[in-house]
């Protein structure tokens, strides 16, 4: 594999805050460093020295600096392309790589917040000070770096057709900061056109409303939202929006300074009543995504192609088979049946549960990679554990071929095999710690409960001891490594009340929350970076439970409703960039794959709240 030749550093620009390295051949940027950090501190720009996999043409596209005319103060200019990829070693990622939270679809309000993955030192921010952006694209995604890098970001300026001699200016400032609050304050201070936009909710069901909070140098009682004046008290302005209709909505915030006008944009999602949306999704799965044909797939819920309006049975890739993440459909339907009795849906679930018990598991409790595929992938086991618990809560009369053992007995058998197969070392996505402990305790079987508690305690001890020195996984460093660690620890705290789990879980949460941005768009706000999911299959999200984080979690789950249409169709991902490697983006992927974990989480969160409050069954409205 050919690597790019490292360029020599010929010039340096220095200030109290910044140290900038410039290439001797053409003036390309090779490094941006925090001057207050050690001399070998993290380089915040991708260059041949730290990102040799980047396309050879990228270096030629970097902005050039002429040292004789360059100026470096407390803020500085920057290259247009940022790398936020992880190196081969996870520890290197935690020490020397960053998440890039990009907001380029908001017109005059545009920014990039770079969060150091391990939380070391100050973070780098960029805010637009002149001009406007219309979105971003990504180049350099390939099968060599696979899901371990996000590629090269190309920010698209809004530039009108220019006559000879005319010019258009796009200008930004770069600065160091710690945390989102300081980031916003610095953006307001550095950019007259920047508008800090915050909404109580970015996803609204029929009849709901939200308050949009606005702050900025030019935000005042002359500011409008879609032509309507905002309400201001001091330097705090707001706008009340009521949902009408269904679908994507953009709101244009217009600020004025003399004759100069700037437009900034935010995006909302208006959905039907959530109860109706969920019911339509249940109907779609049971009527269109279940196989009804004798054979190995009989009863399975399978991937669906919304373009061809049919089941996808021809793709044999593991990420699209009838097992693995597709089990999320069955869990979701079982949770829905706990609140809604429907004979047809119940019959569908029984057929699906029979498929799982006979085609995705053996009598010893082993979970298969797919029907007919005994490949070993421990990630699959927690979802089957969830399914057994969700079905157990329904107290169904099961078909004769699987009635010999109860779902709770199957849960224990699966749990035994999971830990016998090395589960204690896995950062398991969706491991039902709290739900499993509640169910086994409620069963009255003391031995069963104590065994489950022992398994989960030993697992949590392993994670707490490891801290953020994570073992290797399928992707170098990802949200789905950190989130399971946080959830397992925090669910152990919720069951036991032992603060050792809370303290260990909070450390994981600090790392986890750096994956999430604060863009004023329902498709991005608080949604963790999952840049590979449009390629592989889909997305999901879990969050911590306290009063502030609870509202955040509900907002995250509501944002994932962007993956569902009112008629019940699902989509595995929203491809947000305008293009990826030259292929048009900014659309919902047509495949319905594993997105139903979002609805699974929605129903679980509602039931979890009800059980904490002693309310029993709760109905989603």
Image: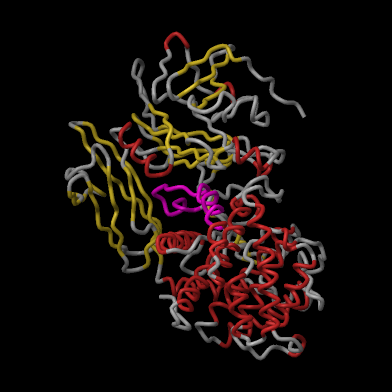
Q: Residue 422 lies in magenta, yes or no?
A: no
Which residue is painted at 34% across and 30% down in the image?
A: 129
Residue 82 left/right relative to 162 = right
Residue 271 placement: quadrant: bottom left
Instruction: Name the image quarter holding the C terminus.
Output: bottom left
Q: Is residue 415 above or below residue 478?
A: below
Span highlighted in magenta in the image = 505-527
Which residue is painted at 42% across and 32% down in the image?
A: 157
Asked whether residue 28 appears in the rendered view, the answer is yes
How is colour applied across the structure in the image?
A: secondary structure
Q: Residue 525 lies in magenta, yes or no?
A: yes
Q: Is residue 308 above or below residue 384?
A: above
Nearest to the observer: residue 283 or residue 602: 602
Q: Is residue 42 above or below residue 197?
A: above
Instruction: Name the image quarter holding the N terminus.
Output: top right
Asked whether residue 293 appears in the rendered view, the answer is no
Q: How many marks?
A: 0
In percent of width and height, residue 155 lies at 47, 34
Residue 5 left/right relative to 192 = right
Secondary structure mostly taken by the magenta-highlighted segment of the chain: loop
Which residue is painted at 79% across and 67% down in the image?
A: 420
Nearest to the observer: residue 11 or residue 147: 11
In percent of width and height, residue 569 lies at 53, 66
Residue 319 placement: quadrant: bottom right
């Amino acid at each position: 594999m050919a690597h790019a030749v490292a360029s020599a550093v010929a010039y340096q620009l220095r200030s109290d805050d910044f140290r900038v390295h410039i290439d001797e051949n053409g003036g390309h940027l090779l490094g941006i460093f925090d001057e207050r950090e050690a001399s070998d501190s993290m380089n915040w720009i991708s260059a041949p020295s730290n990102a040799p996999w980047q396309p050879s043409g990228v270096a030629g596209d970097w902005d050039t600096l002429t040292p004789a005319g360059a100026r470096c103060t407390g803020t500085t200019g920057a290259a247009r392309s940022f790398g936020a990829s992880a190196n081969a070693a996870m520890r290197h990622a935690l020490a020397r790589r960053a998440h890039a939270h990009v907001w380029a679809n908001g017109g005059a309000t545009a920014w990039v917040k770079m969060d150091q993955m391990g939380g070391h030192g100050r973070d780098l921010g960029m805010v637009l000070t002149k001009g406007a952006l219309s979105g971003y694209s990504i180049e350099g995604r390939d099968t060599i770096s696979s899901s371990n890098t996000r590629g090269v970001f190309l920010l698209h300026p809004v530039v009108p057709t220019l006559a000879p001699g005319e010019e258009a200016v796009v200008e930004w400032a770069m600065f160091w900061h710690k945390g989102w609050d300081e980031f916003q304050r610095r953006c307001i201070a550095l950019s007259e056109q920047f508008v800090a936009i915050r909404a109580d909710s970015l996803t609204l069901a029929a009849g709901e409303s939200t308050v949009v909070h606005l702050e900025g140098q030019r935000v005042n009682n002359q500011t409008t939202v879609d032509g309507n004046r905002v309400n201001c008290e001091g330097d705090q302005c707001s706008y009340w929006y009521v949902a009408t209709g269904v679908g994507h909505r953009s709101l244009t915030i217009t600020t004025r300074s003399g004759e100069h006008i700037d437009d900034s944009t935010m995006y909302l999602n208006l959905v039907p009543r959530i109860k109706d949306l969920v019911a339509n999704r249940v109907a779609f799965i049971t009527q269109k995504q279940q196989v009804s044909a004798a054979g190995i797939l009989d009863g399975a819920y399978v991937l669906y192609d919304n373009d061809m309006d049919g089941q996808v049975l021809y793709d044999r890739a593991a990420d699209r088979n009838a097992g693995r993440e597709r089990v999320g459909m069955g869990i979701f339907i079982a949770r829905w049946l706990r609140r809604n009795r429907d004979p047809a849906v119940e019959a569908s679930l029984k057929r699906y549960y029979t498929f799982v018990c006979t085609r995705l598991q053996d009598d010893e409790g082993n979970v298969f990679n797919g029907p007919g595929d005994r490949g070993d992938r421990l990630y699959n086991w927690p979802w089957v554990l969830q399914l057994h618990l969700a079905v157990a809560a329904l107290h169904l009369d099961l078909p004769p071929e699987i009635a010999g053992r109860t779902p709770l007995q199957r849960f224990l058998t699966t749990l035994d095999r999971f830990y016998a197969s090395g589960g204690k070392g896995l950062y398991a996505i969706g491991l039902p710690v709290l739900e499993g402990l509640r169910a086994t305790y409620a069963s009255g079987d003391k031995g069963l409960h104590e065994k489950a508690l022992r398994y989960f305690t030993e697992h949590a001890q392993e994670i707490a001891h490891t801290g953020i020195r994570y073992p290797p996984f399928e992707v170098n460093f990802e949200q789905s490594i950190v989130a399971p660690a946080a959830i397992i620890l925090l669910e152990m705290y919720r069951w036991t009340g032992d603060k050792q789990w809370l303290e260990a879980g909070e450390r994981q949460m600090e790392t986890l929350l750096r994956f999430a941005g604060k863009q004023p768009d329902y498709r991005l706000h608080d949604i963790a970076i999952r840049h590979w999911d449009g390629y592989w299959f889909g997305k999901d999200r879990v969050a911590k439970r306290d009063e502030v984080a609870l509202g955040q979690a509900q907002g995250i789950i509501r944002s994932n409703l962007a993956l569902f249409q009112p008629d019940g169709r699902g989509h595995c991902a929203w491809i947000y960039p305008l293009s990826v490697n030259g292929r048009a983006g900014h659309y919902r992927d047509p495949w319905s794959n594993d997105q139903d974990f979002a609805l699974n989480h929605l129903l679980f969160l509602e039931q979890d709240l009800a059980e904490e409050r002693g309310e029993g069954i709760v109905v989603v409205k």
